[in-house]
């Protein structure tokens, strides 16, 4: 995560707009095809680097519930309507729990924000081109490897 997220961005920071930080945390979690046993160690890592508590909690709750492979498998085995419901409910609960935790612990989060380094510091920069290419190739491989398309499964 720290290799793909540039240090010049503040998408997940405490002072970023909620309309940007919470969906960004969910998007980061949905691209990782890992279970909760891998997300739990990533959570304190992004929180220590300067992410706000709310977006970090959203990442923690959303990532194992609606990662890209879980949604593709759910859609392929149970049906696309349940995959869509899984995605929407996970997004709603992940963002909702993140907002509630940020509201309850806003004083601790403000103190944490002052104490963190500037890992998610300045505004305006984006991901490097090669990191974006890597990310899109990774997602394409995950989708192609798991989708049951006639082109891929036909003999």
Image (cartoon, helix red, strand yellow):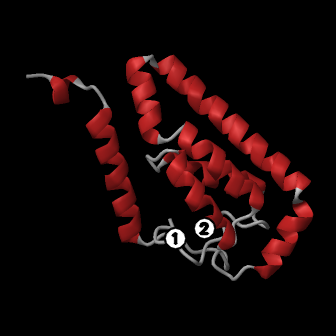
Q: Which mark is residue 2?
A: 1
Which callout, 2 or 1, points to the residue nearer the camera? 2
Q: Which mark is residue 45?
A: 2
* Residue drawn at 45 percent across, 40 percent down: 68
Q: Is residue 40 left or right of residue 110?
A: left
Find residue 55 and report its image quarter. bottom right
* Residue drawn at 38 percent across, 22 percent down: 76
Q: Position of residue 9 (x, y in %)?
A: 61, 72
Asked if labels 1 and 2 touch by Cβ distance under 8 angstroms, the answer is: yes
**Residue 28 seen in the figure:** no
Callout 1: helix, strand or loop? loop
Q: Is residue 70 left or right of residue 84?
A: left
* Residue drawn at 35 percent across, 69 percent down: 130
The residues bearing labels 2 and 1 have C-alpha atoms spaced at a distance of 8 Å
Characterize the local packing of mark 2: few (<14), some (14-19) or many (20 or more) Cα atoms within 10 angstroms.
some
Counting residues from the start of the chain, the first of labels 2 and 1 encountered is 1
Q: Which mark is residue 32?
A: none
Q: How many marks?
A: 2
* Residue drawn at 77 percent across, 41 percent down: 96
Q: Nearer the viewer, residue 17 or 147?
A: 147
Q: Position of residue 137 (x, y in %)?
A: 31, 54
Q: Position of residue 40 (x, y in %)?
A: 59, 54
């Amino acid at each position: 995560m720290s290799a793909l997220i540039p240090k010049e961005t503040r998408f997940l920071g405490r002072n970023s707009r909620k309309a940007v930080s919470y969906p960004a945390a969910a998007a980061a979690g949905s691209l990782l095809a890992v279970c909760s046993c891998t997300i739990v160690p990533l959570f304190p890592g992004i929180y220590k680097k300067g992410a706000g508590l709310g977006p970090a909690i959203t990442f923690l709750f959303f990532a194992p519930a609606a990662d890209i492979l879980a949604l593709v498998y759910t859609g392929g085995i149970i049906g696309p309507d349940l995959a869509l419901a899984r995605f929407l409910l996970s997004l709603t609960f992940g963002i909702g729990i993140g907002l509630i935790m940020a509201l309850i612990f806003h004083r601790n989060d403000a103190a944490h924000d002052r104490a963190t380094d500037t890992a998610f510091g300045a505004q305006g920069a984006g991901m490097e081109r090669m990191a974006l290419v890597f990310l899109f190739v990774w997602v394409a491989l995950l989708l192609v490897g798991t989708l049951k398309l006639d082109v891929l499964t036909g003999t």
